[in-house]
Image (spheres, rainbow, N blue to C red):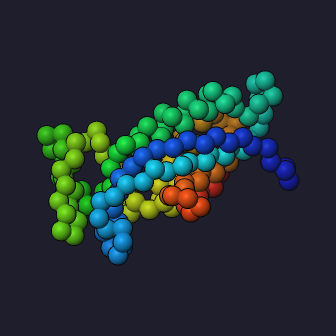
Amino acid sequence: MANEATGIFIEENFDYAHFIPNHPKCYPLHGHTAKVEIKLYGRKEAFDMILDFGELKNICKKVISNFDHKLIASKKYVKAIQNGLVEIEYNKFRLFIPLENVYMLENEVTSENLSEELSKSLLENLPSNIEIIEVRIYEGNRKGAFTIRRR
């Protein structure tokens, strides 16, 4: 890519629940409506476009559906998975959640780690002409985290 970059972007939303056990305010189970801004940089191809917006929207909805209306939890708090239930234990909490309602991350469920996970999942589903992806997750108004990932 030269000294200038041409890109496209799309915005989506999703709802999720999470907890951060060792954080003084975020340890109880609670939820957010996240606004997600996805920026793509790459080579223009068919129709002189980086990617058709309809195709981008479909890819984003497919990937985001894995997170939407789910409990997102770190794998380190998962004690067992059996009979279609995930047993999660931390602090004084013990939860039993249907497996289809849980998305598991390797690390704590922070905005930073969510933007990393989402950018990775999106890039895996995007065509090869996309060279850079930037994912911003807003956790409430005027605050959030972002990840910039190169192929």
Report if residue 19 is visible in the image: yes
Residue in front for this viewpoint, 60 or 144? 144
Q: Residue at x 35, y 45 (%)?
A: 70
Q: How many marks?
A: 0
Q: Is residue 42 left or right of residue 35?
A: right
Residue that extends furthest to the front in the rendered view of this protein: 141
Q: Is residue 118 left or right of residue 41?
A: left
Residue that extends furthest to the top in the rendered view of this protein: 47
Residue in front for this viewpoint, 44 or 13? 13
Residue that extends furthest to the left in the rendered view of this protein: 83
Instruction: Report which quarter residue 106 is drawn in.
Output: bottom left
Q: Position of residue 142 (x, y in %)?
A: 59, 61
Relative height, residue 65 to residue 77 (above, below): above
Residue that extends furthest to the right in the rendered view of this protein: 3
Q: Is residue 105 left or right of residue 38?
A: left
Q: Is residue 63 left or right of residue 3?
A: left
Q: Position of residue 61 (x, y in %)?
A: 51, 34
Q: Residue at x 13, y 40 (%)?
A: 83
Instruction: Report which quarter residue 45 is drawn in.
Output: top right
Q: Position of residue 138 (x, y in %)?
A: 54, 56
Report if residue 121 is visible in the image: no
Q: Residue at x 64, y 40 (%)?
A: 10
Relative height, residue 83 to residue 74 (above, below): above
Q: Residue at x 36, y 72 (%)?
A: 25
Relative height, residue 91 to residue 78 (above, below): below
Q: Position of residue 27 (x, y in %)?
A: 31, 68
